[in-house]
Amino acid sequence: MTTDVLIIGAGPTGLMAANQLQRFGLDFIIVDSKAGPTVESRALAVSARSMELYQQLGLADTVLERAVKINGFHVYSNGKRKTSAVFDDIGEDLSDFPYMMVVFEQNKNETILYENLQAHNKTVMWNTSFIKLTEHADYVEAKVKTETGEETIRAKHIIGCDGARSPVRHQKDFSFEGGTYENKFYVADVHLSNDFDSRKLMLAPSDETFTAIFPMKGDNKFRLVGTLLPQYADKEDITFEDIKAEVSRCSRMKLEYEGVNWFSIYKLHHRCVDNFSKGRVHLAGDSAHIHSPAGGQGMNTGLQDAHNLAWKLAYHLKGYANADLLDTYNEERLPFAKWLLGFTDRGFTLMSGSGWFISRFRKYVMLNVMRLLFSTQNIKPRLFKTFSQTSYDYTKSSLSASDATQKLKFKAGERLPYIEPNFYLHFSAAQFHILHIAKQNLAPKTAANIQATFPFPVNIVEQKLSPAWQKLGVRSELFILVRPDTYIAYMADTFNESTWKTYLERYFLSRE
C-alpha cells in the first residue's frame, strides 16, 4: 500500500490529524491495534481552542449536544460546601465557546472524529499493529500486522500518535526525558444518587488526598478523579470496592453509588521529547509529551499538535511549500509542550502533595484563592485564555512576521483576534486567507492581482474598519495573512507585491 501520510494511532490526536488531512484533500492511511474507538477514557475536558477546531470541521454543535458545559465549582470541606464560584461568562467576547470547561470524554472525541471520517468515505485500519519502520531518502516504509498477516505501507511521511509508550518514538530513538510521580491516581465513571448540580465541578481537598467530581452527560453520571493514599503505592489489582470507603472518608462526602461503569488506577508521568520530528517521522500528542491531568490540557494539546502538523504537511506535499516549513512544527509546538509540562507539574504537586505545608495549603488556601480569582472580573479573561489555550502564540516562530506600522494590540503569530460571534466561520475553509480591513472593499481587479501573487489558493475576507478593530489599534487599511489554523502569519499596511513575495519566499514556492 502507498499513501502520502501514514498515521499510527487512532486516538483523539491521530483521528484529528486524519480529519485535518481529509479537509486538505491529502491521501492518508490511519492504523490502530484496537478493534475500534476506545470505551474507557481518562482525558475529559475539551478547551475552547479545541472547540474552534471542531467548528472548522462543522462538528461543534454536535460536540456541545453530547457534552456538559461546566459553569462553576463547589468546594467541600469535612463534607460540607464551604465556597463556590460561577464562571458562566468567563470567556465572553473571547470565543464562540466561552466555557471554562466542556466535559467531553476521550472516547466521545474518538467517536465523533471517527464518524466524521466515515461520513467522508474514509476509515481506520483497526486491529492493525505497527511493527517497524525503515526510512529512505524519499519515503518511509512501515511494516504492520493485520488480522490476515503482515503488510508494508509506503508513505512520504509518518505521524506517530501511538501514545505514551510509542513504538514509533522508540524505533526512531527520540529522547523522552522526565520522570514519574510517586502518587498513584484513580479515575472512575460512576452513577450517583446524590442531588449534585449537573453543571458544577465539585472539589474536596483533604489533609491526605484530593478528590474531584465532574458531572458527565447522562442521568446521575459523574467522573471521580483523585489521588490514592500512600498505603496503596505498592498494591496491584486494586478494585473500586477496595478504595470506595477511603474516598468517602478522606473527602468526608457521603457518596451514594448506583453503579460503576469504569475504574482504573495508574501512575502519572511527566516527559517530553527534545524534537517533535526526525526526518520524515513526526510525533504528536502523548507520543511526544505526557504530563499530569491538572488543568485538563493533555488531550487538547494533542489535538492542537495534529492541527499544526497537518496543514504544513498538506502544503508541502501539494508542492506549495518547501520542506523547511515542516521544521516549524517542532519550532512552534515544542516550546508549548515544555511550558505545559511545568504548568501541570506545579498544579499536580499542589493537588497531590502529602507534605504538611502542601496539604494544608491545598485544604485551606488554594481553593479559596481559586474562588477569588474566578470571581475577579479583570482576572477572569486571563484565566480563560490560559486554560482554553487561546492565549498561546507563535510570535517567536520564523513563520510570523509583520511590516505593519500601526500600533496594533495584536501581533503576528497570535491567534486572530476574536471580533464578533461566528467570526472564525469566515476562516473555516482549509486554506490561507487574506483578511482585508478597510473603509472600502477591494476592487475585483485588485483582489485578483493579490490572489495571483500567491503560489497557492488564498481566500479574501473583507472587514469594515469598525470600532471593534479601532479598539485593537487598527487606524487605516490593514492586510492580515491568516494561516489555516487561524493564527496570524504576516501583516502589512499595504499589499506591496515585492514585500509580500519576500515573506512568502522563506517557506513557500513561487509559481514560476
Image: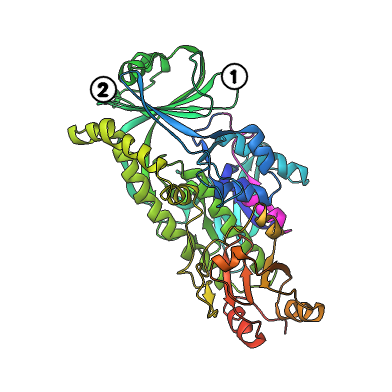
Q: Nearer the viewer, residue 213 or 365?
A: 365
Q: Which residue lies furthest to the right in this view?
A: 444
Q: Residue 277 carries which label?
A: none
Q: Which residue is drawn at 53% across and 42% down?
A: 89
First of labels 1, 2 by sequence position: 1
User: Alpha-carbon distance for marks 1 and 2?
Assistant: 34 Å
Pinpoint residue 158: horizontal percent, then vertical percent.
58, 56
Q: Quadrant of residue 484?
A: bottom right
Q: Residue at x 26, y 31 (%)?
A: 364
Q: Which residue lies furthest to the front in this view?
A: 467
Tell me the quarter of the image containing the C terminus: bottom right
Pinpoint residue 421: horizontal percent, then vertical percent.
65, 52
Q: Which of 172 and 86 is in front in this view?
A: 86
Contact between marks 1 and 2 (CB within 8 A): the answer is no
Check disc 2 and report the residue beneath it. Answer: 231
Q: Quadrant of residue 238?
A: top left
Q: Residue furthest bottom?
A: 498
Q: Which residue is drawn at 63% across and 71% down?
A: 481
Q: What stretch is highlighted in magenta?
A: 17-39
Check disc 1 and report the residue beneath it. Answer: 219
Q: Does the magenta stretch include residue 146?
A: no
Q: Nearer the viewer, residue 215 or 264?
A: 215
Q: Above or below — where is 297 with respect to 510?
A: above
